[in-house]
Structure formats: C-alpha cells, structure tokens
Image (tube, helix red, strand yellow):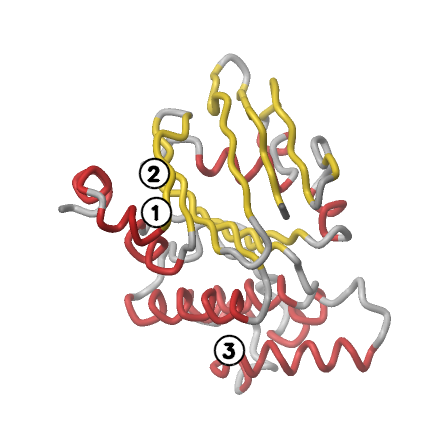
C-alpha cells in the first residue's frame, strides 16, 4: 500500500470536520475523493498533505501511513522528500517569475543540473502550450496554462504520489478536458494520484477507485466506473 489513512478524525476548533475516515491509495492508482462542499474531502487531503495546522485544524484520532511508515504530524515540505507532492487548489504559481523559473523552483531539491534539465524537457513535452512560453511571467498565463504549470512544477519533484486539489477549478471546458487527460497520462507513466475534485463525472472517468464524502464521513466507495453508473451518485452529484 502506498498511502493508508486509518480512522482519521479531524476538527477545526470545536467543529468536527472528518469522522473516522479510512481510505488508501495503491501504487499505480488514481483515487478520487468526491462530494459536496464541506463534506470533508479537502480536509482529508489536507491531513495527508501536512497542511492542517496551517489551516487551523488538528487530527483528533487516526493514523496516516506512507509506504508503511507513519507521516502523521509531518509538514508539507517534509513529505516532499518522501515522495508526496501537492498541487494546491488555486494553482499558486509564482506570478512574477517566468514559466522556466517556476519549473526550476520545482526542481530545487535536485542538485544534478543535467537531471533537472531532462525533467524540465519532460514537463514541457507533456504540456506543449508551456514550451512556447518559458520566458513568460506565470501571472500572465491563462488559468488553464497556470494549472499545467502548477502540475509541471510538482512533477519536477518526481513524486511517487501526486496530491491534486480541485485541478479543474476555474478552467474552461477545453482546458478541463486537457488537464484530466494529462492526469491520466501522468498516471500511465507511473505516478499514483490522489484527487479531490468537485467535477465528479470527470474525476470518476479517470479514477480507478473513488470515495464519496458527505457531512464529514465516507459514505460510499467503489471503482470509478461503478460509481459513474450508480443511481445514487448520479442523482446526488451528476445531475441525473
């Protein structure tokens, strides 16, 4: 098992945001977390990504294991060295820096300049629209291009597990389709992905498995395709 969360309960002050949630990601999988706003899926991702303290949250109970070792309480930057990298909601590219400089920041842990250059070439091959914009300031890119850059910057760290928080947020339909296609391609190259996504239909299309959250609990889990066909999921999340 690559990632495993066991009986995870999280609170923000007096508010219990997640109750006894258990979920996992196997090597080679795309696993999606879907559900309405406030259901607990983003809280679950923040707990895994080491972001809870910064957001005012605390883990009450439960354990989080990455490659069989406890990571509960580790900070986001500490998890990078273990192979877990977050693409945050809202992209958060370095707006005043160029595309090239953003990617270089992603490769900061690698002291091998030739390897960094190879990794950058791989990212620019994966995202051709960025190739012609390497000298462009990231803040002047479209939202879709910024999302590509945020994912590309994360890939420079060569993650074993990519955490993607709402990657379709604010994207046009064309870029939305492209980003999900690229996530599938990234997974095909060997990177496991844990995905939190409001666009349930797109997430389930690419997910091997998924967890459905409601009011701080996981209420349903199955393969992505089975959940796509589920009458309950269609009625609640897919407008069916």
Q: Label 2: which residue? A: 35
Mark 1 packing: few (<14 Cα in 10 Å), some, or many (20+)?
Answer: many
> In terms of secondary structure, where does tag 1 sit?
loop
> Could you say where residue 37 lies in the image, as x and y percent from the top left?
35, 35
Q: Is residue 30 above or below residue 173?
A: above
Disc 3 to disc 1, C-alpha distance:
23 Å
Mark 2 packing: few (<14 Cα in 10 Å), some, or many (20+)?
Answer: many
Q: Nearer the viewer, residue 151 or 66?
A: 66
- Farthest top residue in view: 14
Upstream in the sequence, badge 1 or badge 2?
2
Q: Label 1: which residue? A: 198
> Measuring 38% from the left and 71% from the top, which residue is drawn there?
178
Q: Nearer the viewer, residue 58 or 240?
A: 240
> In terms of secondary structure, where does tag 3 sit?
loop
Mark 3 packing: few (<14 Cα in 10 Å), some, or many (20+)?
Answer: some
> Measuring 40% from the left and 65% from the top, which residue is drawn there?
180
Q: Nearer the viewer, mark 3 or mark 2?
A: 2
Q: Quadrant of residue 76?
A: top right
Q: Quadrant of residue 114?
A: bottom right
Disc 1 to disc 2, C-alpha distance:
7 Å
Q: Is residue 82 above or below residue 70?
A: below
> Could you say where residue 80 lies in the image, as x and y percent from the top left?
72, 52
> Could you say where residue 18 lies in the image, as x and y percent from the top left?
48, 24
Upstream in the sequence, badge 3 or badge 1?
3
């Amino acid at each position: 098992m690559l990632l495993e969360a066991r009986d995870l309960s999280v609170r923000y002050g007096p508010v219990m945001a997640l109750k006894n949630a258990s979920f996992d990601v196997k090597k080679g999988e795309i696993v999606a977390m879907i559900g309405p706003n406030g259901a607990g899926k983003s809280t679950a991702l923040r707990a895994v990504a080491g972001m809870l303290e910064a957001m005012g949250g605390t883990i009450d109970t439960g354990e989080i294991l990455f490659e069989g070792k406890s990571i509960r309480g580790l900070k986001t930057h500490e998890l990078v060295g273990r192979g877990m990298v977050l693409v945050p909601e809202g992209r958060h590219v370095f707006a005043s820096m160029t595309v090239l400089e953003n990617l270089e920041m992603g490769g900061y842990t690698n002291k091998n300049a030739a390897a960094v250059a190879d990794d950058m070439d791989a990212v620019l091959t994966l995202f051709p629209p960025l190739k012609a914009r390497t000298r462009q300031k990231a803040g002047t890119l479209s939202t879709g291009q910024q999302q590509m850059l945020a994912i590309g910057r994360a890939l420079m760290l060569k993650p074993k597990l990519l955490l993607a928080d709402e990657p379709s947020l604010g994207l046009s339909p064309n870029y939305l389709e492209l980003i999900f296609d690229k996530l599938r391609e990234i997974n095909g190259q060997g990177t496991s992905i844990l995905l939190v996504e409001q666009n349930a239909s797109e997430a389930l299309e690419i997910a091997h498995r998924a967890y459905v959250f409601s009011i701080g609990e996981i209420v349903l889990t199955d393969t992505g395709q089975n959940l796509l066909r589920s009458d309950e999921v269609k009625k609640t999340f897919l407008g069916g």
